[in-house]
Each structure stands twice: as C-alpha cells, then as structure tokens.
Amino acid sequence: MPDDARAVLSSDLENYVLAQGRDQLVKDVRKKIDSLGIQYIYYQFVSVTGRVVGKGVPADHWENIATRGFQLVYGATANLFMDRHDNYIGYGPEASELVGIPDPETFVQLPWDKQVGRVFCTLFRNREEEEDGGAFLTADCRGNLRRIQEQFQQDHDGLHLRHGAEPEMMWLTKSPDGKPSDGFSKPYCYHIDQFESLRPVVMKVIEYARAMGLDMIQGDHEDAPGQLELNFTFDEALRTCDRLTTYRQICAQVAREHNLIACFMSKPFMGVSASGCHHNLSLWRGGQDKVNALGNQDLPGMDGVFLHLSDGENLFSPLEGDRKPGPIGLNSIGGVIQHLPALTAIGCSTVNSYRRLWDTGFWAPVYADWGYQNRTCSLRVSAPGRLEYRVVDSMVNPYLIAGALLKAFDAGITQDLSPGEPEHRNIYEAIEEGKTVKKLPTTLGEALDELEKDDVVKSALPGEMYKVYMHYKRDEWERFLATVTDWDLETYWDCLP
C-alpha cells in the first residue's frame, strides 16, 4: 500500500504513535529510566475538573505502554463520579475504554521518591469503537488545548499564547479527625514573619518544583490564614498548564510530609481574601526554547520538561510612543470582554468560586471592563505587553481556561473587536457616576446559562467535552440548591415559635 494511502487509513492514535521523531524520544526515556533507577511510572492525564488521574505501571513495560497505551474507562475524564440521580457523569458503564498514550517529552522523576517517574498522556477513543475508533478523545482537556493551540497558530501566522499563573492557595492545619481546623499562619499580607513561619514548606515546594522543571521566581504571604503565592516563569500555554498541575501535585505531597492540608478551595474563610489564580497573558510570534539546566547536574527527566520559550515578538507590547497595547492586544482584550460572562463559567468553576466574587471588599473582579493597574476591573494591563485576567480562581482547570481564552482572542482578532477606552477610576465609583458596564454572573448557575449561549467559548469544549463539563457542573449546582447548609440552620431553625 502506498504511504499516502496508508496515511489516509490511519487513525489519530496510529499517527500519533508513529509521528516523526517519537520513536527516538521513547528510546531516550528508556535511557533516563535506566540511568535514574526508575522502577515505576505514573501515566497521568487531567479530568474535567482539573484532578490528576491515570494508572501506575512498572517501568519494565515502558516500551509497550508507549506504543500500545493503557486503557481506562471514559468516565475517568469526569473523575468517575455519579450525579445526584446516581448516573455516571458523562459516560455510563456501557461506554468503551479510552486509550492513553504517553508523551515522552513530559517524562520526569518524582523528587520525593526517585524510584518513580511521571509522564503526561494524550487520550484517544478505543481502537475497537465502530465510530471514530482511535480518534482523539474530545473529553481530554489537555489534548484539546494542544489542538486549539495548533489551530490558533495556523490561523494567525504563528501567533501563540504565553502565560503565567499566580497560584494562590492556603496551608491549613488538621484537627484530630484529619479535617481542616485553621490556616497555619496569620492573615498578614506580605509579612515576612508569616512567610518565615512556613519556610520549611516553601523551601521543600521550591526544591521539588525545580527538580520537575518549574523555574521558581518569587513568592509571598498573602492576606488570608496560611495563604501563599509562589510563582514560576511564564511559558507557552500547554507547558504552563502542565506546570500548574505539577505544582498542585507537589503541594499535596509537601502537605503530607508536614501533616498539613494544601487547600486550593477558593474561599474557605469569610472576612479575608479568597485564593485567586490570575493569568498574565500575551501573544507572541517566534522565539526559541532554552533549557533551564538546574546548574550543571544531569536533568532528572527529559529536556522537554525543562524547556522554556523565550525571546520573539510580543504583539501585546505598545506601539512606539503609545501606552495602549498594540492592535492585536487591543483586539484580544475586546474579545475577552465580549465573552467574559461565559468565560466565568470556566475560570470560576465551582459553587464556592462565587463567594469570592460576592466579597467585593476584597477587590473582587465582577465587572467586564479593563484598565491600567486597576484592580477593580476584570482585566488590567499589569505591565507593558502583558494583560492580567483576574476572573479566575485557584480551582480552575488550567487547560480549559487557556483554550477558552485562545478562542476569545481569536474572536477579538478576526472580528476586530475594540475593548473601548481603559477605565482609570475605581469601577464601583465609576458606576455610581453613571457608567454602564456589564456585571459578571454571580452564581455558578448563572455562569453556566451564559456558557450555553456563547458559541465561541463553547468551541473551546469540543465534541463530548461540552456535554461532560455541563453534566458535571449542572449537577454540582443542583446538589448545592438541594442541600441544607449551616446558614439555613442558623437563619431558620427558630424562626417561628
């Protein structure tokens, strides 16, 4: 059979496994396995809610898994959870099993147990499916982002998203029953003494993070109990999302070592700030990969884990003599503002997320507007050439929001959308003075309604992903509405004699 005919008959899965250069990467991973003494490998992917799921396999089977993959039920993409009516979310027990194929360039040793390695995987439909056998599984949020990235670059002459995340989270102490009792430190923002109280935790997180490819750059104590923000260098979107996922895994491990709880819930405490995860965004053309080599030591994983994209042309940078972002940057801001209500369903993805948005005394970004260094707006130009997207919190699935933002950027650029003039006033005072500005959804239910109406943002959840996401989140909202809370009891238990 001619090569071109074989290519037509091949599935996405076969094409992926046989991609040019992949065979050598598989061999290079074997060399790492042997030189590092790896005995066991976690093959992992990310569910619709951002959880890390997958399988563990002895390292002896690396070559077979790299070629054939592993199988797991489709419902694992929705945490294999059931809805309030006892139906599995997304996929029932009659559904086929997905095939996970490891991406060799993401292989790295776990620094807390050097016998164990980790590799991210791309997901496919089962080979035996009658329809679309071996096709990309559209409920794979990480795989979707890669394909959305590639399409965006193709449509916009090589433009690509680079972003950095500001992952706030809280370190909580445990009560005797193992449940959270309080934040480890006092809610004093930027106080070095409170930062110092968590120094053993901070230093261990940094040690592990650097060993797994994160270039850690700065950190501080925030203004909630036990709340820290530790930042790493920005990069192209897929790597940033992988690193945020890795950072969360690292925090969970460090918490186990220190008998603490690494809490990514957005607002566990009232009266103090919630945990956000601001995204700093820019669109670039060109650039080159450089290895962050951790000094002169041999890398405990594949080079791809330690690469960072640098240099190139930043299309968000102002034109000479101007303060505003360049034309592409302004169009991108216009696209985000137009689609902010639907984006909120992804960036603020839990019932608890909206506790953060209601607590407006703590700089909650609840209005669809933009400005320079203006933290009362949902979007702000935090530095020349960089846009801070503030309507995203610590529970976000980074792959979903990155894909959705790319779709909003695409709409802004192709439709030549203008964001209007930047707001210099406190947005609440501007509204009192008569400014009309769109308010964002105030509940998860409202946000999901907005998502249902927005075809641009929905396109970031292609195929089965939209069905799975909406099933999961509608069920979460309905469970909340059907639950008697402490507030109910405290407000109503003695309201009548």
Image: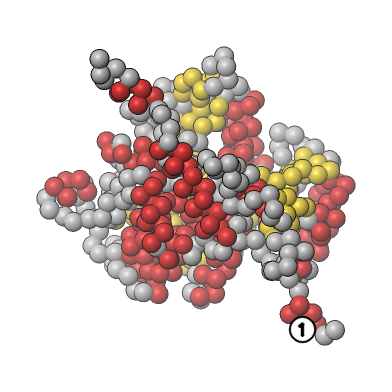
Q: As rendered, which of 84 and 267 lies closer to the eye?
A: 84
Q: As rendered, which of 142 and 493 lies closer to the eye?
A: 493
- Quadrant for residue 319, please give it: bottom left
The residue at the point 60 percent across, 61 percent down is: 138
Left or right of 239 in this view: 350: left
Work out whether 470 lies above or below 362: below
The residue at the point 33 percent across, 41 percent down is: 357
Position of residue 35 measured from the top left corner of the image (x, y, whole percent): 84, 45
User: Alpha-carbon neighbours of circle 1 within 10 Å: few (<14), some, or many (≥20)?
Assistant: few
Question: Would residue 149 be seen by someone viewing this image from the given angle?
Answer: no
Residue receiving disc 1: 4
The residue at the point 76 percent across, 52 percent down is: 71
The C terminus, quarter of image: top left
Left or right of 318 in this view: 91: right
Residue found at the far left of this picture:
433
Position of residue 206 measured from the top left corner of the image (x, y, whole percent): 59, 36
Left or right of 437 in this view: 57: right
Three-letter residue code for mark 1: Asp
